[in-house]
Amino acid sequence: MILLAMALPLAGCTTTVTHERTDTVEVQAKPTTREVDQPLTQQVLVFSTPKEADGFFFERRILTDAEGRAHATLLPAALQCLVYGHAVMVSVYAPDQDKEVSRESVTPDRAMEILQEWQVQTRLGATAHLRGAEIALLDRAIESLADTEAVTKLRDIRTRVELQPDWE
């Protein structure tokens, strides 16, 4: 028996098992979002920014999930902030309650953080869903901004943009 155990390795009948650890990266579909908690499920919330002189503004109507949360991307607000050169207030309004339930200011520094996060996510394969006016604003930002770091981030994001219909 002992001879048999010693003979197997010499005969080339050994098996080597290797384990290779792999890392996975989870791509978030909606990076840099504003989350709002509400007690009701399937409640409509309106995320919006003030209208600019040329008529641009950001608005999304979003249903809360089963836990009463709603998520909206802040990328359009960041673009608005950078292109128009001022902080932008994102308001969250609950039409059925007729009140504002949350607000967040997107400053130029916060806008750059949002671009950085979107750049990373798009390099990992995430897609930015923007409406036509928002895509036009993104293209305008790429053409007009003097900040080369911001333009590089915007170009990376632009490669992963898909048109979201206005009715969605």
Image (cartoon, helix red, strand yellow):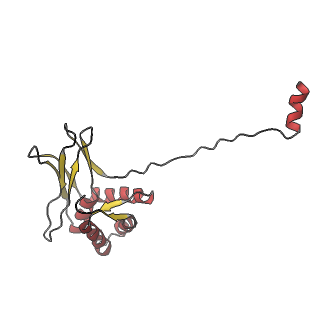
Q: Residue furthest left?
A: 98
Image quadrant in which the N terminus is located: top right
Q: Relative to residue 28, is residue 11 depicted above or below?
A: above
Relative image position of residue 13 (x, y in whole percent): 83, 39
Q: Which quadrant is home to the C terminus?
A: bottom left
Q: How many marks?
A: 0
Q: Nearer the viewer, residue 77 or 19?
A: 19
Rendering coords of residue 83 (x, y %): 24, 68
Residue 74 on image: x %, y %? 27, 55
Seen at 10% across and 43% down, the residue is 97
Horizontal arrangement in the rendering, residue 31 relative to residue 108 (left or right): right
Rendered position, 95 above or below 143? above
Quarter residue 162 falls in: bottom left
Locate residue 46, reporting x and y percent. Answer: 17, 52
Of residues 97 and 158, the one nearer the viewer is 97
1 versus 36 height, above or below: above
Farthest residue in the bottom direction?
Answer: 143
Q: Quadrant of residue 67?
A: top left
Which residue in the rendered view is the most extreme toward the right? Answer: 3
- Residue at 18 percent across and 63 percent down: it is 57
**From the viewer's perspective, is 68 left or right of 51?**
right
Q: Nearer the viewer, residue 120 or 146?
A: 120
Residue farthest along the top direction in this orientation = 1
| Residue shown at the point (32%, 56%) measured from the top left | 114
